[in-house]
């Protein structure tokens, strides 16, 4: 058993090493390597081992939770990869157990829907809280949060945000945890995510809307997700990246051309928001009295205090320590009462377009602060 544990530590070390540089925004809108390769590599590293084989090296390496520098002042590759395994393997095991528990709840949901929803939400919160702790505590990511004092604890809301990288969800989760709604987050996600090992089935079982951009099919999926919210008044943060894809310069150029042809306004550092899903969500959820707001979230990053909107990849957020030595992380939220939003579909589309123009102004002010060497901890915009 000892030799198998040594072999496991070796395999995890090689597997984790392959993940350190994983990611980077891709041009393809399909599921990215950043979301699959890290899972696949670790699953391959773990093949053929029993549970007790996994636990032994994890326990032996627990003293390496914080990274030990090499004599040159940098983390040794061996220490880095072992630490990476120590962080991710327990979380993946927790995710697998959560998937099994969520699966067991599905047959019971027709008999005890409220209890099953509360229980599945609590299970989901344990998963999100675990990955959030890896990011903020183990890997020292300091998130600058602005506007969170506007959010009433426990309020159900529609949450819209710009989309820069996979790591965006950490910033939104920081807001949700402060508002006491981490367990109630339900994210619009691409259908391709259901093929990600461990994660995909769990997303569906947690009640996440998995969309395809084919509106007829997506409407059925939204009805599935909205049913409990509308009929049973389940609490929810319905989270959507309104641009429907991550920001890249190529996509920005294409969006600028499209906006010129279609006479649309476009905010700085953003893509044009997709309005159909937002309008449908507002019109559906405004009919229930407990969903009372839209939260407009603005996300920003900087690398090495020089490169604006250059976030770490998802792999880097998991496997690199001392993230705040290299990156700035910023999230701002504006709260809008759902009752104050326009009533017609067309006016709601224009409202979202206007929010994206204002969001672009906010991002441009952040870029200017970065360029002048100033902190993002100071207020950069008034309530708008």
Image: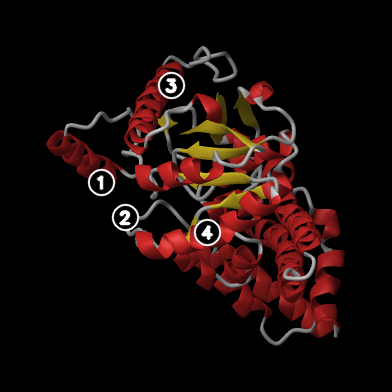
Q: Marks 1 and 3: in contact by CB < 8 Å?
A: no
Tell me if residue 11 comes above or below residue 226 in the rendering: below
Spatial CA span between label 2 and label 4: 31 Å
- Residue drawn at the location 74% of the way across and 31% of the way down: 153
Labels 1 and 2: the sequence-earlier one: 2
- Residue 260, image quadrant: top left
Q: Position of residue 248 (x, y in %)?
A: 33, 45
| Crowd tier of the residue under label 1, counting other residues whose Cα lies within 10 Å: few below 14, some 14–19, many 20 or above | few
Q: Nearer the viewer, mark 2 or mark 4?
A: 4
Find residue 27 and name its label: 2
Labels 3 and 1: the sequence-earlier one: 1
Can you identify the residue that label 1 sits on?
Answer: 250
Q: Nearer the viewer, mark 3 or mark 1?
A: 3
Spatial CA span between label 3 and label 1: 22 Å
Q: Nearer the viewer, mark 4 or mark 3?
A: 4
Find residue 223 and name its label: 4
Can you identify the residue that label 3 sits on?
Answer: 362
């Amino acid at each position: 058993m000892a030799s198998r544990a040594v072999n496991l530590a070796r395999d995890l070390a090689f597997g984790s090493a392959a993940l350190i540089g994983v990611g980077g925004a891709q041009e393809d809108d399909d599921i990215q390597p950043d979301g699959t390769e890290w899972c696949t590599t670790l699953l391959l590293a773990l093949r053929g081992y029993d549970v007790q084989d996994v636990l032994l090296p994890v326990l032996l390496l627990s003293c390496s939770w914080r990274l030990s520098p090499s004599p040159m002042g940098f983390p040794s590759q061996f220490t880095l990869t072992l630490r990476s395994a120590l962080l991710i393997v327990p979380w993946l095991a927790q995710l697998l157990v959560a998937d099994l528990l969520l699966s067991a709840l599905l047959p019971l949901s027709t008999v005890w829907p409220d209890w099953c929803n509360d229980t599945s939400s609590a299970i989901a919160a344990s998963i999100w809280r675990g990955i959030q702790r890896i990011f903020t505590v183990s890997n020292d990511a300091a998130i600058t949060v602005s506007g969170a004092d506007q959010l009433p604890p426990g309020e159900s809301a529609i949450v819209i945000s710009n989309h820069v990288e996979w790591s965006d969800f950490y910033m939104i989760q920081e807001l949700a945890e402060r508002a006491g709604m981490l367990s109630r987050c339900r994210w619009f996600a691409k259908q391709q995510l259901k093929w990600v090992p461990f994660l995909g089935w769990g997303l569906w079982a947690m009640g996440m809307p998995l969309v395809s951009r084919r509106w007829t099919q997506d409407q059925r999926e939204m009805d599935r997700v909205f049913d409990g919210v509308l009929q049973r008044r389940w609490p929810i943060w319905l989270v959507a990246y309104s641009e429907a894809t991550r920001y890249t310069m190529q996509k920005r150029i294409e969006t600028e051309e499209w906006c010129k042809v279609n006479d649309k306004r476009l905010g700085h550092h953003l893509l044009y928001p997709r309005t159909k899903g937002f309008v449908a969500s507002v019109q559906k959820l405004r009919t229930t009295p407990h969903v009372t707001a839209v939260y407009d979230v603005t996300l920003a990053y900087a690398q090495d205090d020089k490169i604006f909107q250059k976030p770490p990849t998802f792999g880097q957020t998991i496997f690199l320590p001392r993230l705040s030595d290299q990156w700035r992380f910023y999230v701002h939220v504006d709260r809008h009462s759902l009752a104050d939003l326009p009533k017609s579909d067309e006016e709601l589309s224009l409202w979202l377009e206007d929010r994206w123009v204002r969001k672009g102004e906010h991002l441009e002010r952040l870029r200017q602060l970065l360029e002048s060497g100033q902190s993002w901890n100071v207020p950069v915009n008034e309530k708008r």
